[in-house]
Image (cartoon, rainbow, N blue to C red):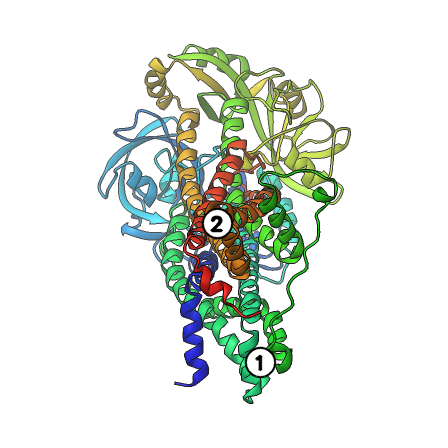
Amino acid sequence: MRGLNRKLIRDLWRMRGQALAIALVTAAGTTAFITLLGTLLSLEKTQSAYYERFKFADIFANVRRAPESVANELVRIPGVKQVTTRIVFNVVVDVGGMREPINSLLISAPREGEATLNNIYIRKGRLVRPGSADEVVMIEPFAEANGLHLGSHFSATIKGHRKELKLVGTALSPEYIFFGVPGAMVPDDRRFGVMWMDRDALAAAFDLREAANDVSLSVLPTVSIDDVINKVDWLLQRFGGVGAYARKDHVSHATLNGDIEQLRTTTEIAAPLFLGVVAFLLHMLMMRHVETEREHIGVLKAFGYRNRTIAWHYMKLVLVIVGVGICAGLAGGAQLGRAVTRLFAANYHFPFLEYSLTPTVFAAAIVIQLAAAVIGAFGSLHSAVRLPPAVAMRAPPPPVYRRTILEMLGLRLINDQPTRMILRHVIRWPARSLMTSLGIALATAILIAPMAVFDSAKHMVQVHFFMAERQDLTVAFAQVRPRYASIVAIEHEPGVLRVEPFRATLANISFGKRRRRITVIGKEAVNQLSRPVLKDLEALAIPSSGIVVSSSMASWLGAGVGDFLDVQFLEGRRPLVHLPIVAVAESYVGLTFFVLHMNIHQLNRIMADGDVLTGVNLRLDPTQAYNLFDALKNVPSVTGVVSHTAQLQAMRRMMQQTTRMTLLNVVFAAIIAFGIVYNNARISLAERSRELATMRMLGFSRLQVSYILFGELALLTFAAVPLGAAIGYWLGWKLTAGASNEMFRLPLWVEWNSFGYTIVTVLATVILSSLVVVRRVFGLDLISILKTRD
């Protein structure tokens, strides 16, 4: 073994504690990078493959009733590749074991061998037989959540008639990777499902023979989606079309894309943080190591070793340390990445999961970490090779310490002499002190950011379920119904304590160059159950004229109070009106991102179809809830029932996954804080061992000497925590913005408790790592240290 290699091994053993700390940080960074990137690529690859294999459509449109021949007209639109027409209706399902009415979407099933868009993947059983009037294929998560299996029987209310159905197959669909009750905040597999039934049977039940009410289109990648949508809308208008929309506005696709974008944002934020910490630690380590190796470097040069040989020797030290961390990180990232991918995929319904951990991912992680190592060590290595032998073989000049401002002002300090030494040492090495504080601040930020996301989710739930949407139940009707008569009828149902009507209708809004399909909700002026809230979370009374928009819509449109929007309604006479914005409300639910609130009487006047409603919000007597559920199952006009209690439970289940990710970030942040503090303390101990030994000889106690090291770290930590809190708050803002999707929007909201937990965690880590180093102060060999040659 060459002499330099033996020296390398001895150096590594001598600094094994510091090397291990840096290796742990490198391993944590590599693990996080591979986990995030592997999960991101896996979801993207699975999404792309699923869409392609099962022909997920590019454009979707609903109509009241269109002849099947409309497909021939649509396919002639330039750029359209394929058109599929379907029959789609909301129905209420009665499943044994569930007292609540269950919402379901009933869709005409494709025939065997038929070339259609939005194909379904049969997991078990078979497709429905042509002509069968009682067979259905059910989406798999819904069947499993309700304990249904092949051959199970249940009933559904179809066009006012109760019908017994038989489950002959379970399936998945690219159209319903992520789905829930329309208007609901989160999906609930037990209370909402999708079923496919023979088209002829559906056509007979809903009087749509040789007709359809749903259209899907695929287009060439080179054409403008907006141009095709405009032509589709124009063609379907005479059939009662309510506005086509692109794949990007499809709830399932938009929600999945939102999670993918959140992962991408997290990766873009986390990777630079970890790389910066690794580069900083290596810079600190090598700077001190080269300084202590001055004489060795001078001797090596005197014996004829070339500069590049010496540089490569010290670079190998860096590469060995980083290499150990990278190897551990690659193994950890491979395992953790698969687990996190499954955790994300559990919210979605894929027939397969293509976990993408390619050599490219590993290569990228290795190259990036090595680049950080080289950057971190470059400055110190450059100093080493430029050091002339004669200069290197002399001891470095002692540092010059100056009085601090506090001393100049004549202020006495606690434990005066040691405290002055702490302040002077911090000021003597400002760059090192600043970098150490910045490193601890980054560890603090990495901990605060995920807790900010968790706090924001809790705040969103609090505002949505307990301030804005406080109803127990939302009931939707198949079509508009007389408002007064419907309220009176529902008030007489068992357990109903309060009824608040609403009317929902689709419209296109325009403001400048911005145009979007939205839902207009008409409500009474004053509501106790479902009402918009202002930024200060006070309830907002809906004015008798004008419209109320959400803050998200106002931001997207670039509009505010006093601006006018063009609102083109897509139902009935399709009126076009010019309405002023009279208020901006807070709304955290994605589906209400683009909802206009207006007075129900004003909306009914505009639509000119009478005093009507499309649904009601209810407050219930809990003891009578099941009696009401039984009654609603037999109301033909009811097509949807949303339990807000069930929605709250589903949201809390989703938030449990966020808690796991938060704990993982706590571990990573603790590793980073430990690595930074431990290395800084060890470097400080090595630099000041002679100074500390001299103090011991002068009569200072071990605790006083330890105070010098611990006090410096405490001072730097005290300066770092506020900065880390500010950086973490900013990172939390970036992450919450990335987490927002079509289902919900996360407002940035950080509880003071989270700052407290973060500070306690960081301080505990600093104290633990400091104690490891301070323990060495008690074992200082005073004689050997003081024999060191000046």
Helix or strand or loop: what does disc 2 sit on? helix
Evaluate if marks 1 and 2 touch, with contact meaning CB atoms under 8 Å apart: no
Residue 366 percent across, percent down from the top left: 48, 69
Q: Secondary structure at mark 1?
A: helix
Residue 745 screen position, x and y as percent: 56, 38
| Left or right of 702 on screen, residue 223 | right
Q: Is residue 600 left or right of residue 342?
A: right
The answer to whether residue 710 shows anywhere in this view is yes
Q: Is residue 463 above or below residue 251?
A: above
596, above or below 233, in the image: above
Picture residue at 25% right of the left edge, 29% below the top:
96
Residue 247 in sight here: no
Q: Nearer the viewer, residue 721 or 149?
A: 721
Q: Residue at x 46, y 59 (%)?
A: 782
| Quadrant housing residue 24 | bottom left
If the image is split into quadrants, where does the N terminus sit?
A: bottom left
Observer-nearest of 790 and 19: 790
> In this picture, is 767 found above or below 300?
above
Residue 181, disc: none
Q: Picture coordinates of residue 303 (x, y %)? A: 54, 88
Q: Disc number at residue 298?
A: 1
Residue highlighted by disc 2: 669
**Viewer-side residue, 369 vs 39:** 369
The percent coordinates of residue 254 (x first, y second) are 53, 47
Disc 1 marks a residue whose amino acid type is Gly
Dividing the picture into quarters, in which one does residue 242 lie? top right
Of pointers 1 and 2, the one earlier in the residue sequence: 1
Report the mark closest to the observer, 1 or 2: 1
Q: Residue at x 41, y 75 (%)?
A: 9
